[in-house]
């Protein structure tokens, strides 16, 4: 089978790799001139945290996300499976209890065990939830590795090209263009996420840390080389403007409250990603006309892309149907 994949974000690259590994002839067509411009994947947090996501997501997200951790560990050596820490300041301990009730596969740590795991947090927090099986990665390095693997598999890649211009010539079409697919998938909406990348030489964290707050929970993800990604914002908007002053202040304040040394951090970059989401925030494989659309990954792009890619490949190559993510009728109720 010959397949054209439209879009070179994490969904498109994962699908291309899955298809090529299964023997398909694959080409990727990406409108952006380079990988750095291929959608919201470039600004992702890179947390592979299926059980933390149970706090506000359907069980389907955890089931698919668990598959994703194993997939990434096989294909990207930079995947670090060191778990996730979830903490709260003293006045917000109620948030920690609520988080624990809604999630699973964690252990509760006291101050001493927390300090042994992350010495830089010693004396700052009395309790934490530790999700030992979760993982994280550097999205930009992971995208580069997927692109290199796809090229090794014989996938052809064209950047700066419009997939609608060239005829398909007997190819199947797999669309992974996120919000750009809204002209066909009318229910899609944009969910804006904002991030900061900082260098903090006086902070040493080895795993993602989520700090709970009733209004603005924040996460800090180590990227190596003394760099950390700070993110949190979930804004119902598809405006592709730069990060707001309020968001930057809130992110920096939350990081400073986690560790005062973040106050001396060097801001390397700020960014905005527009995540595509359906009304129920669940992903879809949907056939429309002659194309199979992989979309609606919401804030779970790197977590869910592998599982969606495997199902998309099997749907195209073997005609399999996956009721949990496939709905031929846009009005069909989702199965979670």
Image (tube, rainbow, N blue to C red):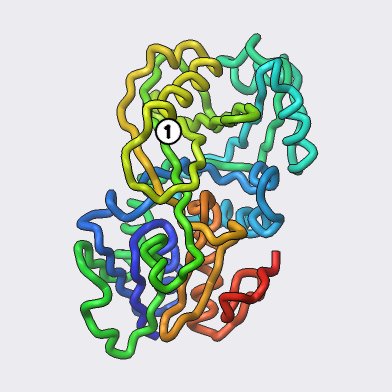
| Displayed quadrant of residue 141 | top left
Q: Residue at x 41, y 66 (%)?
A: 182
Quadrant location, the N terminus = bottom left
- The x, y position of residue 139, in whole percent, is 41, 45
Residue in the image at 54% along x and 16% along y: 257
**Snapshot quadrant of residue 216:** top right
Is residue 104 something one can see in this rendering?
Answer: yes
Q: Which residue is mark 1?
A: 223
Q: Position of residue 10 (x, y in %)?
A: 42, 57
- SS at badge 1: strand
Query: Residue 124: image x %, image y %?
Result: 63, 12
Q: In this rendered view, identify the residue nearer to me: 241 or 78.
A: 241
Residue positioned most to the bottom: 170
Q: Quadrant of residue 115?
A: top right
Pick the front one: 260 or 281: 281
Query: Viewed as shown, does residue 329 lie left or right of 174?
Result: right
Q: How many marks can you see? A: 1
Describe residue 142's horizontal placement relative to residue 211 as left or right.
left
> Could you tell whether 216 is left or right of 63 in the image?
left
């Amino acid at each position: 089978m010959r397949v054209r994949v439209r879009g070179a974000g994490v969904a498109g690259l994962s699908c291309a790799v899955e298809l090529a590994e299964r023997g398909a002839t694959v080409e990727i067509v990406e409108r952006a001139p380079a990988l750095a411009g291929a959608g919201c994947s470039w600004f992702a947090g890179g947390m592979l945290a299926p059980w933390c996501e149970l706090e506000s997501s359907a069980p389907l997200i955890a089931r698919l996300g668990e598959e994703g951790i194993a997939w990434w560990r096989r294909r990207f050596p930079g995947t670090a499976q060191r778990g996730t820490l979830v903490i709260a300041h003293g006045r917000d301990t109620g948030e920690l209890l609520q988080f624990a009730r809604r999630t699973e596969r964690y252990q509760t740590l006291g101050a001493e065990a927390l300090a042994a795991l992350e010495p830089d947090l010693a004396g700052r927090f009395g309790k934490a939830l530790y999700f030992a099986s979760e993982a994280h990665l550097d999205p930009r390095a992971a995208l580069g590795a997927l692109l290199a693997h796809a090229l090794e598999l014989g996938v052809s890649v064209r950047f700066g090209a419009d997939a609608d211009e060239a005829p398909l010539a007997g190819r199947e079409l797999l669309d992974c263009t996120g919000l750009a697919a809204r002209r066909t998938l009318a229910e899609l909406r944009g969910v804006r996420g904002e991030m900061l990348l900082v260098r903090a030489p006086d902070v040493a964290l080895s795993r993602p840390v989520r700090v709970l707050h009733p209004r603005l929970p924040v996460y800090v993800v180590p990227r190596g080389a003394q760099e950390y990604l700070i993110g949190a914002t979930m804004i119902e908007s598809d405006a592709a403007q730069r990060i707001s002053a309020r968001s930057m202040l809130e992110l920096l304040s939350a990081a400073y409250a986690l560790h005062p040394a973040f106050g001396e951090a060097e801001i390397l970059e700020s960014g905005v990603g527009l995540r595509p989401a359906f009304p129920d925030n669940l992903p879809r494989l949907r056939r429309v006309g002659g194309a199979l659309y992989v979309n609606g990954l919401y804030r779970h792009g790197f977590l869910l892309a592998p599982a969606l890619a495997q199902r998309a490949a099997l749907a195209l190559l073997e005609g399999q149907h996956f009721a949990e993510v496939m709905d031929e009728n846009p009005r069909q109720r989702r199965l979670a």
